[in-house]
Image (spheres, rainbow, N blue to C red):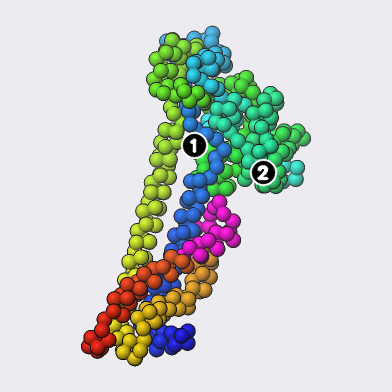
Amino acid sequence: MFSHILKLIINQWRGNLWILAELFISFICIWQVGNVFSSLLSHKLRDTGFDLEHVYRVTTAIREKDSPSYDPDSPLTDDWKELVERVRRCPGVESVGLTSYTAFPYTGSTNGRSYFGDTTRTTALRGQLTPDVIRVLHITSPSPEVDLVKETSTGQTCFLVSPQAMEQLYDKNTVRCRIYTKDERDKAYPGILCSYLTNEYADNNDNRALWEIWSEGRMIEKNANKDLTMLIRVHPDADHDFRETFLSTMRAQLTAGNLSIVNLTRMEDYRTYILNLSSINLMYGAGYFLAAFFFICAFLGIIGTFWFRTESRTSEIGLRMALGATRRQVRWQMIGEGLMLFGIVWLPAVIVSYVLRTAVWDNETLLSDTVLFITLTAVTTVLLMLLIVAGIWIPARQASRINPVDALHYE
């Protein structure tokens, strides 16, 4: 049977060349679309190490010195401390934390610095957080043995190290380490592995980050006049029209000296705004649309090709049945030809797909390179085989039901 089908393919080599070319190109394109899609999906599903539900960003404004109502006797540091305490006492508020502008989720900051391990060096994103931010964002560590709230509540400066930065400085399995800054190479700070990433869509290089944990007092002293951001977590039972309730009931307490709260923004809404602003949602939508469009085109193209090829051989089918072949034998012979044509191009297509991977979309995914390669190859192979069988089975089944004498009239 195998040798017979191979002879048929060789005898019809002119027509089969176009089919081989179509299968070869379709396999490569579907494989690459799957590769791109797996990377996009991996970013979307990546663990950011924080939870934005019931979290709000507080927008503040500082009164200008040339303003008639400016109070020169009210230090901005005292204003920040007073306003934080007022918000902390507000009903429904679970915790309040302060971050530098470069360290809260979805800032898009590229502010970096050189950091050192015992013998290695890396450049990583930097920013400052107070220990309460860990409670606000529910920041986690990949290691279940690490209690970030407990380990950062000592009041000493320490670093939260992202997995990407930890791998550069020590090893991906390291949980606790020593971090040195360029200016203080003789002084080591404790580093703790954490999962906190401000943006799940950035690549590994952009996710190298070391977040400095500062006490609240130090954070206010250093950043009061620059880039201080307040984040609050609200109790789930109180998170019903919380923004409106907060701004109305706290109206008389929204200003402390020269500092005022002007707005509250739900962080989930802020995330959507940033993703729309950076066209990430648009890119993903376009990616899904193009992937669906290509699969539909491949579906129609391959099925159409084999459907037409099978129907054009109705007279051949009739002749085989007149010579004693059964309907079952005819159908499986036609399917065997289609699958053998696919088998001829399968290995070259797999090799080319693998070579093109680094040139087209070499990006990290949740799967290892080996598992991803095997998965994409298996899925693409099964998909094309199903399309081939679908394009042959129905017309072959219809043709095999024709009376052999009537089928011969096609000649």
Does 225 sit above or below residue 43?
A: above
- Residue labelled with disc 2: 166
x and y percent of residue 250 in the render? 44, 13
Give the residue type that dot 2 points to. Answer: Met
Of residues 47 and 128, the one drawn nearer to the viewer in this rendering:
47
The answer, for residue 391, to whether it is visible in the render is yes
The answer, for residue 76, to whether it is visible in the render is no
Give the residue type that dot 1 points to. Answer: Tyr
x and y percent of residue 194 in the render? 63, 38
Residue in view at x 28 percent, y 79 percent: 401
Residue in view at x 55 percent, y 35 percent: 50
CB atoms of marks 1 and 2 within 8 Å? no
Q: Secondary structure at mark 1?
A: loop
At label 1, counting other C-alpha atoms closer than 10 Å, the crowd grade (few under 14, some 14-19, many 20 or more) is some
- Residue labelled with disc 1: 106
Does 196 sit above or below residue 410?
A: above
| Residue numbers of the magenta segment | 360-380
Left-right relation of 177 to 373: right
Residue 176: mark: none
Q: Secondary structure at mark 2?
A: helix
